Amino acid sequence: MQWFTSPDNKSGCRHLIVDAYDEPHLLEFYQRNGLNLFFSSLEQEMEYRNWNTEKDGPLETRLMFRDMILLKRPSIR
């Protein structure tokens, strides 16, 4: 995240999106580092992804994001 917000980076990247393994210690790690889950429940995410547990198996990852503009603008952190 720091690389994307450094003055030397000219990528224009604002959002960081991670498809994280659905394991409590990993989700907690990402949340401690400022990422949020896209969906408030596993059921919502499965519906969004059109996920069929019988056909596709269990959903093993969760979508997470961080708006990196918050790293540049301390007034809105």
Image: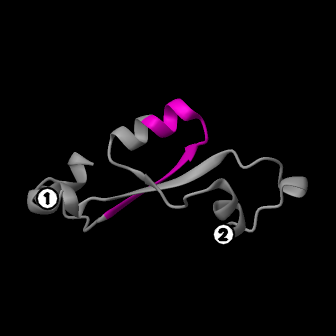
Is 25 inside the magenta-drawn segment?
A: yes
Is 49 inside the magenta-drawn segment?
A: no
Q: Residue at x 70, y 61 (%)?
A: 46
Looking at the image, tell me whether mark 2 or mark 1 is earlier in sequence order: 2
- Of the residues shown, which amino acid type is indicated by label 1? Lys
The magenta segment: 15-28
- Image location (x, y in percent) of residue 40: 55, 58
Q: Quadrant of the C terminus?
A: bottom left
Q: Residue most toward the top?
A: 25
Q: Label 2 vs label 1: CA separation?
A: 31 Å
Q: Element at badge 2?
A: helix
- Residue at the disc numbered 1: 72
Q: Nearer the viewer, residue 6 or 66?
A: 66
Q: Is residue 41 above or below residue 58?
A: below
Q: Residue at x 50, y 61 (%)?
A: 38
Image quadrant where residue 67 sits? bottom left
**Left or right, 7 with reference to 45:** left
How many tags in the picture? 2
- Residue at the disc numbered 2: 48
- Image location (x, y in percent) of residue 11: 26, 64
Crowdedness of circle 2 by 10 Å Cα count: few (<14), some, many (20+)? Answer: few
- Of the residues shown, which amino acid type is indicated by label 2? Tyr
| CB-based contact (under 8 Å), mark 2 and mark 1 | no
Q: Residue at x 21, y 63 (%)?
A: 69
- Image location (x, y in percent) of residue 6: 14, 53
Q: Residue at x 32, y 47 (%)?
A: 34
